[in-house]
Amino acid sequence: MSPAGTRKPSAAAFIVLMALAIPFRAGAAEYPRIPSLAPSDPVFRQYSDDVSAARIALAGKRADPLPIALYTYRAVAGDTLFTVAARCSVPYDAIASLNRLSAPGDLAEGTVLVLPALPGLYLPDDARGSFETMLLSSFDPDDPSIVSFSFHDPSTGERRAVHCIPDALFDGTVRAWFLTPRYRFPLPSGVVTSSFGMRKNPVTGNLVFHRGVDLAAPRGTPVYACADGTVKSVGEDPVYGKYVILLHEGGKESLYGHLSSIKIELRERVKSGSILGTVGSTGQSTGPHLHFEIHENGIPKDPAGFIKGTSQR
């Protein structure tokens, strides 16, 4: 495609894309890197100038096509999606959609974010998970205001297409889903082989209440903390085998059973995604799998209501 327009590059020598413009150059170094989200940082000042220019363009005070300027920033300890968005003066909807964050907690220390100067929603070609499916279904793909381009995604190292709807925000349904606390899947991948509720015990044959879900995975697969928490208990049990119990905010606990090894210690603070141990078949088990439970105020709850992608493959 041919560019629909151009404007003078900034002092940071960033690349500007106009509506229906040619793609960015390949390579991770194509975007200016913001070392610190502080006014004393010259790259951040340039980014702030570009945010202001984009808002002026959105207000119709400039005749040029809308500019798309992208920068990168590596999240540090204490950063959240909301604090980063506030410092950048860009809605968190824009940062989350461009970086494919499906919940605020997906932003972890060390994550390299691509920061857009133009407020809006940045939609992928294809949905990845239920959140993006919901997001894509809420917009008209033939909307004439859409600005389409491709860019280098530092999270994957690949180029991907994205479609910006300028000045758009999550609608009420999408926003509620995005802000509802959810826990991450406790394995890199896995298949539910036994669900929450009444079932026949595969070892004893007795009809019992299954207080969690069983997730089949190869022996030695890393087991992740489903959310930030504190290690409440570690040990070995005749039924659960080697297990870990984490205490989370809001009176919630998560249990990880049948582990082959345990990688953390009692009372240790862990972050969502921390490796707790590895999949095994200890205790009352017929093969390698993770037994995963979530309790709320001492009452077992169906993990499918809390974690994203309970039946991931």
Image (cartoon, rainbow, N blue to C red):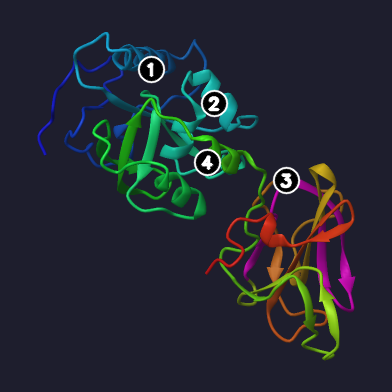
Quadrant location of the N terminus in the rendered image: top left
How far is disc 4 from disc 1 in space, using C-alphas? Answer: 25 Å
Taking depth in this image into account, of 139 and 115 the one nearest to the observer is 139
Q: Is residue 225 magenta?
A: yes
Q: Secondary structure at mark 4?
A: helix
**Of the residues under marks 1 and 3, which one precedes in the sequence?**
1
The answer to whether the residues at label 2 and label 4 have Cβ atoms under 8 Å apart is no
Crowd band around label 1 with a 10 angstrom C-alpha radius: few (<14), some (14–19), many (20+): many
Look at discs 4 and 1 and give the one toward the viewer: 4
Q: Secondary structure at mark 2?
A: helix
Taking depth in this image into account, of 239 and 55 the one nearest to the observer is 55
Where's residue 16, x and y in %? Answer: 24, 25
* Residue type at tag 1: Val
Which residue is denoted by mark 1 in the rendering? 51
Magenta region: which residues? 221-245
Look at discs 2 and 4 and give the one toward the viewer: 4
**Of the residues under marks 2 and 1, which one precedes in the sequence?**
1
Give the label on residue 174, or none. Answer: 4
The answer to whether the residues at label 2 and label 3 have Cβ atoms under 8 Å apart is no
**Of the residues under marks 2 and 4, which one precedes in the sequence?**
2
Where's residue 79, x and y in %? Answer: 60, 30
Crowd band around label 3 with a 10 angstrom C-alpha radius: few (<14), some (14–19), many (20+): some
Q: Relative to 243, is 202 above or below?
A: below
Q: Is residue 106 left or right of residue 299?
A: left
At 51% from the left and 22% from the top, the residue drawn is 36
